[in-house]
Structures are given as structure tokens and as C-alpha cells.
Image (cartoon, coloured by chain):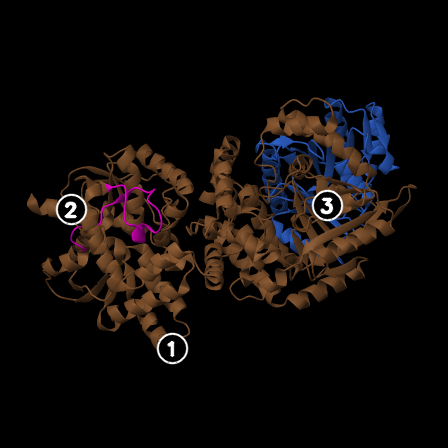
Amino acid sequence: MGNEEITELTELYERFKNKLEAVSGECYRTKTSKEAGKLVCEVLQGKGVRTVALLNSSLSQEGNFIEQLKGAGISVSTDRFREVTPDAQAGITLVSYAIAELGTLVQADADANVNQRLCSTLVPIHVALVTTNNLIPTLMETMATIHRLPQIPGFVGFITGPSRTSDIERVLTIGVHGPKQLVVIFVDEVVEGVA
Amino acid sequence: MADNQFKHKIGEALGNNVLRGALGRFGDAYSIAREKAYEGYNFNLIRENIAEVKSYAASHLDDMLNQFEKEASARGAKVYRATTGEDAKKYILELAKRLGVKRIVKSKSMATEEILLNKTLLAEGMDVQETDLGEWIVQLAGQHPSHMVMPAIHMTKEEVADTFTNHLNRLNEPEISELVKTARVELRKKFLEADMGISGANMAVAETGTLIMLTNEGNARLTSTLPPVHVYLVGIEKLVPKFEDATHILQALPRSATGQQITSYVSMVTGSTPVYLADGTIKDKEFHIILMDNGRRKMYSDDKFKKTFQCIRCASCLNVCPAFQLVGGHVYGHIYTGGIGTILTNFLNSEKDAQNPQNLCLQCGKCSEVCPGKLDIPEMILEMRNRMGEREGLPFTQKFALDIVSNRKLFHSLLRIASVAQRPFTKGQPVIRHLPMFLSGLTDKKSLPAVAEVPFRDMFKNIKQEVKNLKGTIAFYSGCLIDFVYPKIGEGVISALNEKGYKVVFPEGQTCCGAPATYMGDRKNARKCAIMNIEALEAEKVDYVVSACPTCTHALIDSFKDLLQDDPVLYVRAEDLSRKSRDFSKLLSDLGGLPFNGDGIPLSVTYHDSCHLKRKMGVYAEPRKLLTDITGVQLIEMKESDRCCGFAGSYSIKFPELSGPILERKLNNIEETGADVVAVDCPGCLMQISGGLDKRNPKIKVMHTAELLLEKRVNAQKK
């Protein structure tokens, strides 16, 4: 990666972070997948989380997430998500892209993996991992990127901050049906198998 | 004309302080949030893009539907086309029965509200849960949504708590965060148990068969993740041609709807997706899409209403509507509320259902200004009003008044009689409380100024015009208010134009511009007025035609042409007149304004934009420049300077209960500036605002720009 690209990514990351924080999301950046695993443990411990649903990915495997989480005293489920996610205190998934313009995450698994949605929707805390390289500057470029995929994935989900409502007296309240907290962790390391 | 029952509903809504408080607070916050959300974005470009892709879809509707069906089917969706709401209900009911469905969760869908789907399903003993918080509240309370985006905006937290208490048989405190928590817990159970999900969509992409939903709460995500059966009910207007076309709507919808840059969630579903079945296995779900017409096609094939296809249901037209802000959604009577709702009701429910609510439109045009789909809602409502008027005729009193107005000699002689007959009422004061019914239209409830003793047409003969370096001739079209109530404005117009080197003529045959007839739905009389004026003004013989009433100017520029499209000879003359017509401040400004004028005495002035001048003609900078060019004048901008004053012609007579509070808000904004004078460019606004200030704060003067310019110049000359 050239210096210019690195500067550009940092600029995109900063834009994303500002936008996400404006809608009550948390944003971090780490160099390696192992550091990401460590950070996830710290963040979850800080929130008092004891049970987590982890949708494994090449990134979480490379970063030894399971071992690190267990080492931190957090019990990890990596399957039977339909049973597990209604009660899990947090869910960890790897998402496909991030849109800097809006502070938005994009889930666009080619197979429309239902577990990706369960682990990011039913849980009160969603920890989303994303490869820093997959930051896209604008909404328009994101739509073009999705359009260029071999086919539009069965489910494409944009996530911008935690779930919210203003349906009672127009008062903003965080956390209705979806997660009450959203933690986004950018990982600079490019792990084989991560789109 | 609004019937008594409708008037009663308005009265009830106005008496509901909760509703007025909530709507008022929201309206104020909305405009600020919307503006902020669009910061750094070119709203006009976005709406151009939306209009382009949506109008393309509208004019290739069958292609779009076929392509969508083909693409979605290829991805495992079963697509059904419902001609009517009944068809759609039957399809869903049969499907649910066939699959043995007992528990249904719904994520927000106005289309299911439109066809009262819940009623059908509940009657079959199925459990149907709305899951959007606002919709759920409204469902539990046994009501209908009062707003497309915020269904329960009319309810307080106390009312919500009571509703929950009744439903759950346990006490709920009116604490919003607790109420939201309760909803989360209660509805989460429903989501996990549900064997069918029903959703609406914000967009349907023809190219890829993709459905797109925007939500904040996450209910659409849960609905499209958990139940093994999923049905989408989609109005055919949701179609966009290409996948990337959706970008434009994604840019506008959250910003215009709630002032957000983007909603918390955007879900795009293409065909059937994997789901967990009860036995723990994962399979592709049973996936159905219903493309529903239910009156839409009729609306889109009507040239005058085709643009409704461009509506993206953001409800910004409601949020900026002065009438909606006062009465809320339930007064409109049906599912779709506000201005756009009135049009949708007309086609999707019945014309009869739209008859009352269409009266609520002030024709102020604020909604068109903010509409991301570029719909001219007031024009469409006017078209509805005219068609109703043509079909059913107007009530006798209105018809009688309009027949008189379109008979110039009779109208003018009655006005002359009025100036004498009103004397007992004026008690020597310049402002009276009553005016004969043919000018006021119908009632005596409104405070109005006196009819001038000498109308402008008589005064004109005695005005000495001194024109140095004659450049040309301008015909002055006074309009009724300047002619018979505010002749002084006419003097100002002539004096300013004389100074610019133009001689002003006053064609005697001119009469009412026809606006009262146009806005009451009487195209026949409006057309009569158009012809009389075209013939009288003889635009062919002058350089310009000037009017100092923007409503009249709008008639001269636009309405006459529209009314005479069927007459090739008169149409050519109407076009000529249109080309030469200018509103006073625009013309004076085009001619270079009046530099170095005024007496230099300090005067603080605030400016009120008339709806027609700003939004029909795009004129707002010109009068401000004319005013600030007067030495001594200091311009203080008021809040919401382009918000309607509530006059709106006969509106103030039809709905004094709405016109009153709208005026009050204007007066508050005026008083807040501390200005000595309110300058206006419309004699209608002048009448309305001075009528209000006369009672409340007579120290503040209301003057037409032409009047103020004249007064300051005369004073300067005296010095």
C-alpha cells in the first residue's frame, strides 16, 4: 500500500468515525486481526458481557477470537444461532463494506447468510468487524459496487448506528427492536479470504 | 365546500392541545433538521434525478412490472399482481390459510393500511401484530396512523402508557424509555413466534427484482430474518428502473422524512433468502411479492396526476403544511393524510372522500418547494377542486358571488354601492368589520378594510404623469383590491414607473383576474374573466403589463393560458400577455430600481413574502433590494418570512378557525423583529396582516412596497 493510499484510508476512516459517533455508535481501528480480537475482549468486558454469538470468519479465525474471548471469561457460541442469539449478550460479525460518507456498514454476503442477520439484529450489542480497505467514500459508489457483484446478494443490509425510534412524542430513544449498541472495529490487516 | 361534520372535526382537532403542541413542536424542529441534513448536498439535483427515474418508470409501467416480475421470480419469489385491494387481501388470506399461519408480524406498510388488511386477517382468527412502534401503539389504541412517517404523532406518552396498561393488564408509567423497552420485550416474543411476516417496501427495482426498505427500529430486518414465510405488499408506484437509481431516493427519503442523513437500517431483499425452520434446518423461505394497483393506474394515466408516481412518501409536504400543522392527520379522514394524502384518497378511496379535505389546501405552495419528487401538489388539488366544481356545481352562495364577479359592470357597480352602503359600519374609522357578501364571499366573520370612496379607476384620470425621456408604455392591471380598496398602491406603481421613463395606461375594461373562481373550482367563470381581461388589456399595444398583486400577476402569466388552451386565437393573445406581464417589484427591479431615493429618516422594515410572488414567480430578492435602496430603511428579516399569512383568498372566509392561528404565527414573527413597518407585495396579504395588527398592535404599519417607495420619495421631495 502506498503512502497516498494510507493517507486516503485514514481520511475515510476519520469521516466514517465522525458520522458513526454522531449517531451514537462506537468506532475503533486496529492494525492486526489479533489486536482486533484483544480489543473486542476489552470492549465486551467493559460492557459486562458474558455470552457472545460469534459468526466466524477468516478474520476472526486469524485473530484467534475464540481463544481470546474464552481467555477473557466470555462464553462463545459459534453455531445454533437461531437458539442462541435471542439470549446472547452480544454478537460479532464481519461485514462487507463501510461507507465513509454516512458512517454506514454494509452487509452483503453472497449467500445472504441468515446467521449474519441473527448475530447482528437480535443481540443488544453488535460488534462489527470490517477490513479498513473496504471503506468506500460515498453511498453512490457503494451502490455501484454492489451492482457490480456477480448478482445482487439476497440480503443487503445497511446499518448506521444502533436501532432507534422517535415514535413517542418525537423523543429519540435508542434501542427498539435491533441492537442498543453498535461497536465498529476496523482492521487494517488484510486476511486471505476476506472480500 | 366543507360540510358541517367536517367543520366539526376541524374544531375538535383545534381544541386538542396535545395534538397542536406535538405537531407544532415537530413542525418547527423538522424544518431545521431537514435543512441540516441536506447541508452540502444539492437538493435540486437530487430531486431532478428522482423525477427523471420515477417519471421514466411511470411512462414504462408495464415494462417495469414485467421486468421486476421476471427478475424476482428468477430469484425464487412468487409474484402476484393485484388489481384491487380485495384481490390482494384474498391472496394473502388464502396463502396464510394454506400454510396454516397463525401468527403474523408486520413491518410498516401504508399499503396494508390502505386496504385494511389487518381486519381481514383478524376476522379469520389470526394474530396480527404491527411491529413499528408507532403503528403498534395506534393498533393497540384501535386507531389509524395520523401521519405516514410518524403514525402516533398525535398521542402523548401518557396516552401511550394508558394504552399499554390496558393491553398488557399491568401498569405502565409514562416514561418514554420504559415504554420503548416494554415494546421491545413484547414484540420480540411476537417476532420469534411468528410464522408469517408481512412488509411494505419503499422501492422496487425493476432491473434486479430487489425490494428496499428504510427503517430506524430494526423491525423490517427482524421481519425479513425470522418468519419462514414472507409477503411483501407493494404499490406499483414503488418501481424504479435500475438498481443504482435507488441511490437518489436513498439520498432524499431519510433527509426529507425525518431530517436524518440515512435511517439506521436500509434492507435490500432480492428474492427468497435462507431462513431457519422450526426443526432447526435452514432453507430458502416461502417468499411472495404482491404488486398492487388499487386505483393507482387510473391516477398515473391521468395527465394531470401522473406525477404522483414520483412521490416517495416522505411526508415532507405534511410537515411544512400550515393547515396540517394545525389539524393533524385524522381530520383528512382516510389513511393518507395531508396534501398528497388528499390526492391519493381521491383515487385510491373515492372522490367523495376527498371532497372535504381538499378544502384544507391554502394553495401556498410551500409543499412543492420541499417535495423531493417535484410534485406540484397545490396544482393537483386545484385540478381536483375544479373537476368537482364542474361535476357537481358550487353551492348557491358561492356560485352567485362568482357569477357577479365575472360580470364586470354588475360587480363594479355593486362595489361602488358598497362604498356608500358600508358607511353606517365604518363609524368614521378607516377599517370596518363587515363587508357586503359578494366581496367577502360568504360571511361576516372577518375583519376587512372599507371599500375606497373613490376607486382607482376614477382616481387614475386625475393622476398627473410626468415622464422625462419617454421609453415606452405600460398597462397597469390593478386587480380588485387595489382598484376598490387600496387605490394608494396604484399611485405608487405609476409614480415609480413614470420615474423610469414609462407612461402608464389604465385599460378601463379590465376586471377581476378570476382567481376567486379558479381557487373555488369554477373554471367557467375564471375563463370568462380571462377573456375579458385579455381583450381589455390589449397587451399587443404596450411594452409591459404590470400588476401589484402577485395573485393577479400569476393569473396574467399562467392561468389565462391554461384556461384558453382550447381557443387558438385567444391563446396566442394570452401568450403575448403572459410574456409582457410582470409583478411590480420584479419589473421595477428589471428596469434598474430607484437609486438614491428616500428621506433618510431611519425606518426599520420587515418583509413578508407572498406565496404567489415567491413560489410562483421566484421573486424575493428584488423587493428586498428595492426596500434597502431607500435611504434610512433598515431591513430586519422575520422568522419564516415566506410562510403563508393565512389569507389565501376565500380560505380566510371558509376556514376562519384555521386562517386565524396561521395569521397569529405570522404576527408573532412580525412583532419579534420590532420593526416599524411590514412591507408586502400583495394586497391580499396586506389586508390579512393589517386586519390582524389592527386588533393587536396598531403601531406597526403594513404597507405595499409601492406605497412605501412613494411615501419615502414624496417625503424626500418635501424636505
Q: Amino acid at mark 3?
A: Lys
Query: Height in image: B167 above or below B448?
Result: above
To which chain does the residue with label 3 belong?
B
Callout 1: 10 Å neighbours few (<14), some, many (20+)?
few
Dot 2 amino acid type? Glu
Q: Residue at x 50, y 31 (%)?
A: B17
Earlier sequence position, callout 3 versus callout 2: 3
Sequence order check: which comes first, mark 1 or mark 2? 1
**Are tags 1 and 3 found on a single chain?**
yes
**Of the pair B438 and B139, the residue shown nearer to us:** B438
User: What residue is disc 1 on?
Assistant: B568
Q: CA distance from mark 3 to mark 2?
A: 67 Å
Frontmost of labels 1 and 2 is 1
- The residue at which mark 3 appears reads as B119
Residue B592, picture quadrant: bottom left
The x, y position of residue B351, in whole percent, is 56, 57
User: Which percent across, then down, holds residue B674?
Assistant: 28, 33
Q: Nearer the viewer, residue A90 or B538?
A: B538
Q: Earlier in the sequence, mark 1 or mark 3?
A: 3
Relative to B634, say whether B534 is above or below.
below
Q: In this image, B165 relative to B261: left or right?
A: right
Which chain comes out brown in the rendered image? B
Residue stretch in magenta: B432-455
> Seen from this angle, which residue lies furthest left?
B719
Q: Which residue is mark 2?
A: B711
- List the single residue furthest toward the right: B279
Chain of the residue where label 2 is placed in the rendered structure: B
Numbered disc 1: what chain?
B
